[in-house]
Amino acid sequence: MKLIIPAYEPDNKLLKLIQDIQANTGYEIIIVDDGSSARCRPVFQAAIIKGCTVLTHTRNQGKGAALKTAFTYLLQNKEAESIVCADCDGQHTWQDIKQITLATAGHNTSIILGCREFVGNVPFKNLIGNKITRGIFSMISGIKIKDTQTGLRGFSPQMLPWLIHLKGNRYEYEMNQLLEAKSAGYELYSIPIATIYENNNEGSHFHPVRDSIRIYLPILKFSLSSISCGILDFVLLLILHRLTDNLMFSVTAARIISSLCNYFLNKNMVFHSKGLHLTAFFKYYALVIFILACNYLLLTFLVDILRLSLVAGKLLTEGILFFLSYIIQQKFIFRK
């Protein structure tokens, strides 16, 4: 088994983890020095003395880039063994690392996730950040995971080419693994692990604002297309209704125009689908017709029967149908 540890500005916690791993397992340890300062050289030198392989970046490139460097090293050396990735800041015990290792043997087509339970003395920013991220991820993907930000993960060697070519060089890389796994033919399998935060997690190099944006951006990208076209549809509806005073015509015309924009945005910018893909096109417009019918019936009910304003009725209608439309697109229309 190969244990990969990306390390930026590590301290003695890394050496303690190495000692525990070597005392209790026979795992080969590969460490990636992601452009750490000169003061950390003794730590990496000690790791080399202990028998670890240390790969070095001359400058800091990010956690995703460090993981890809290790994956490339394994692929080039044709290492056909299970792979586990762990953090260097003391959050993962050798017992939990061993749990992930054992699980990889029976799940060759799954990403094994060591999911923290978030009980006990958990820093507030970590607790809230994980709740927000897993909520958004669950809403968009339809998959519930307790810990979307875990750095303790297991992979089979057959995943190496996919892992190397996956987009992202920093913390967003791990989120991209979760988002792209299903379309690549991989499942997500979770195992509970201990939640460990020492000194309020001061050793973490995670930047709350900058890195949160990087993590959330791949998820928000999925929603941006639908939101922007929803705004276009909303504006067109108001304009056409003002000009014609015909609700049926206004809803239909606005949806035809906005749906064309939505299809091409999803095809080219969200799912990066190449070619014409007539099957996807016809499936998409079958969905458009279904959503259009639901939109008109629900909007008519809200405006004509419940006497809501057109603006209020439209907002409520779009809010109800938005998630249904998007999930169908992701799972059945633009599946890779």
Image: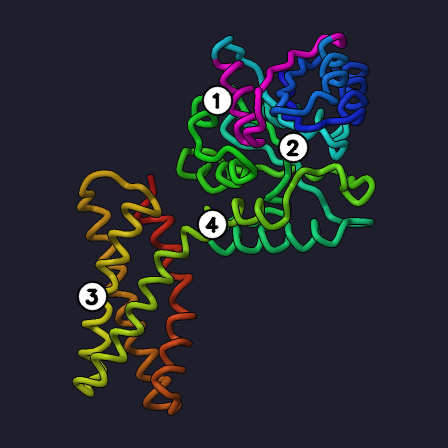
Taking the spot 52% from the left edge, 49% from the top edge, the residue there is: 216
Q: Residue furthest front?
A: 38
Q: Is residue 208 above or below residue 50?
A: below
Q: Which residues are magenta?
A: 49-75
Q: Which residue is mark 2?
A: 152
Q: Report, in whole angstroms, how far the alpha carbon at label 2 lies from the one at label 3.
A: 46 Å
Question: What amino acid is labelled 3 in the image?
Answer: Ile
Dot 1 or dot 4: first in sequence order is 1
Q: Position of residue 296 (x, y in %)?
A: 28, 77
Tell whether position 311 is magenta.
no
Colour pattern of the rendering: rainbow
In this picture, residue 191 sits left or right of residue 171: right
Question: What amino acid is labelled 4 in the image?
Answer: Ile
Q: Is residue 20 above or below residue 189?
A: above
Q: Which residue is mark 1?
A: 160
Q: Report, in whole angstroms, how far the alpha carbon at label 3 lies from the one at label 1.
A: 43 Å
The 10 Å Cα crowd at callout 2, few under 14, some 14 to 19, many 20 or more, is many
Dot 4 or dot 2: first in sequence order is 2
The reply to whether residue 149 is visible in this rendering is yes
Q: Are marks 4 and 3 in contact (CB under 8 Å)?
A: no
Q: Are marks 1 and 2 in contact (CB under 8 Å)?
A: no
Q: Which residue is mark 3?
A: 256
For label 1, the SS is helix
Question: What amino acid is labelled 2 in the image?
Answer: Leu
Q: Which residue is mark 4?
A: 219
